[in-house]
Image: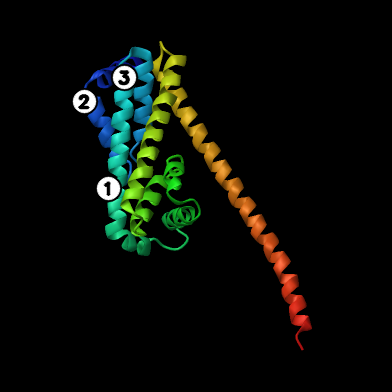
Amino acid sequence: MTESILQVVHEVMSSPWVYLALFLLAATDAFLPAVPSESVVITAGVFAAASGSPQLVLVVLAAAAGALVGDHISYAIGRGAGGRLLARARPGSRRRRAFDRAADALAERGSLVLVVARYVPGGRTAVTVTMGALGYPRRTFTRFDILAALSWAVYSVLVGYIGGMAFENDPIKGVVLGIALALGVTALVEVARYARRKRRLREAESRDELLVPAADQESARTP
């Protein structure tokens, strides 16, 4: 059973149509986050290392081009219907929190957040739609999105390539290792973001504690 599945996957990865499939999956993932584009790109990297097919550079280019096109579609959706999407997102809901975090990150880090959002679950869609809804300059968006799409494609392919090199004779294990590495990176990013939010919350609480006594002293001096 495993051998037959491996044979089918190998045939798919050896087909010249795999590059079009990678392009379409990476593009669709921008506005339908459930599409497993990263897992497929990692799998392509594994087979590139294990069997030499598909071609590594072409995988990177197809995935990056698809991600770039998909992000611009997501940006256009935000530009045209972003206000309605935000209005429909209930306060406190997961979608609303994602949009709020994206807006805060944009205010703090600007366009560089496009790169960071690649490694945050659901972050890519929230950031691109929010940038469109806020009327972020398209030229600036495109410039940073090229960097984001290319870095994501290189990262995903290299993670798969490492898995393929580690298990050259067993690509299935290589895929598992590659996906595990990607999940590990995502988990580290989430832990770092959580620690950063906690630190900022503590700093805000400390500032409030300093301001309250000062306000009390001012009230006491006022007749």
Neighbourhood count class around disc 1 (C-alpha, 10 Å): few under 14, some 14–19, many 20 upward: some
Residue located beneath label 3 in the image: 5
Horizontal and vertical percent position of residue 136: 36, 56
Q: Please tell me whether residue 90 is drawn above or below residue 178 in the rendered image.
A: below
Q: Secondary structure at mark 1?
A: helix
Asked if disc 2 and disc 1 are in contact, CB closer than 8 Å, the reply is no
Q: Amino acid at mark 3?
A: Ile
| In this view, the mark in front (2 or 1) | 1
Q: Identify the residue at horizontal 62%, vertical 51% (top origin).
A: 198
Residue located beneath label 1 in the image: 73
Neighbourhood count class around disc 3 (C-alpha, 10 Å): few under 14, some 14–19, many 20 upward: few
Horizontal relation, residue 91 to residue 44: left or right:
right
Q: Secondary structure at mark 2?
A: loop
Q: Amino acid at mark 1?
A: Ile
Find residue 151 and report its image quarter.
Answer: top left
Q: Earlier in the sequence, mark 2 or mark 1?
A: 2
Cα separation between marks 3 and 2:
19 Å
User: Of 203 and 35, which appears nearest the observer?
Assistant: 203
Confirm whether residue 79 shows in the render.
Answer: yes
Horizontal and vertical percent position of residue 44: 34, 23
Asked if disc 1 and disc 3 are in contact, CB closer than 8 Å, the reply is no
Task: Give the tally of numbered discs.
Answer: 3
User: Of 155 and 12, which appears nearest the observer?
Assistant: 155
Horizontal and vertical percent position of residue 56: 33, 21
Residue located beneath label 2 in the image: 17
Cα separation between marks 2 and 1:
23 Å
Neighbourhood count class around disc 2 (C-alpha, 10 Å): few under 14, some 14–19, many 20 upward: few
| In this view, the mark in front (1 or 3) | 1
Asked if disc 3 and disc 2 are in contact, CB closer than 8 Å, the reply is no
Q: Secondary structure at mark 3?
A: helix
Horizontal and vertical percent position of residue 143: 35, 44
Q: Identify the residue at horizontal 34%, vertical 59% (top origin).
A: 135
